[in-house]
Amino acid sequence: MSDRQKVALVTGASSGIGKEVAKALVAKGWRVLATGRDRARMASAEGEIAAEAQAAASRCCAPISL
């Protein structure tokens, strides 16, 4: 198994299938480079994708209390 992080370039990540693909990859631990045509929509999508990354990290690595 490789210690290298997987990287994906997702085009059209500001909405629709591209945004959902970016969120799914981030949730699986991939580093995602996302592009889109509309800066405002990309800024909004970036927030959603980052939130998914944070949620995935908390699901994956939450401390356990005994």
Image (cartoon, rainbow, N blue to C red):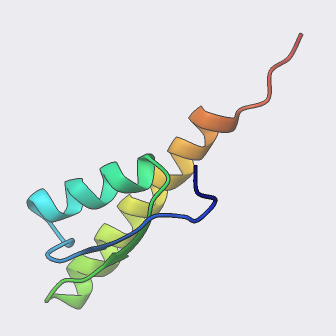
Q: Give the x, y percent position of residue 51.
A: 47, 55
Horizontally, residue 8 falls left or right of residue 60, namely: left
Is 20 or 48 nearer to us in this picture? Answer: 20
Residue placed furthest toward the top: 66
Residue placed furthest toward the front: 1
Horizontally, residue 34 falls left or right of residue 3, namely: left
Residue that appears at 52% across and 44% down: 55
Identify whether 53 is placed above or below 65: below
Residue that appears at 86% across and 17% down: 65
All told, the count of numbered labels is 0
Identify whether 47 is placed above or below 63: below
Horizontally, residue 38 falls left or right of residue 62, namely: left
Quadrant of image for the C terminus: top right
Give the image quarter of residue 57. Answer: top right
Is 55 or 30 nearer to us in this picture? Answer: 30
Give the image quarter of residue 30. Answer: bottom left
Residue that appears at 10% across and 59% down: 16
Q: Give the x, y percent position of residue 8.
A: 34, 70
Identify whether 9 is placed above or below 39: above
Residue that appears at 21% across and 62% down: 19
Q: Give the x, y percent position of residue 32.
A: 39, 70
Residue placed furthest toward the left: 16
Give the image quarter of residue 38. Answer: bottom left
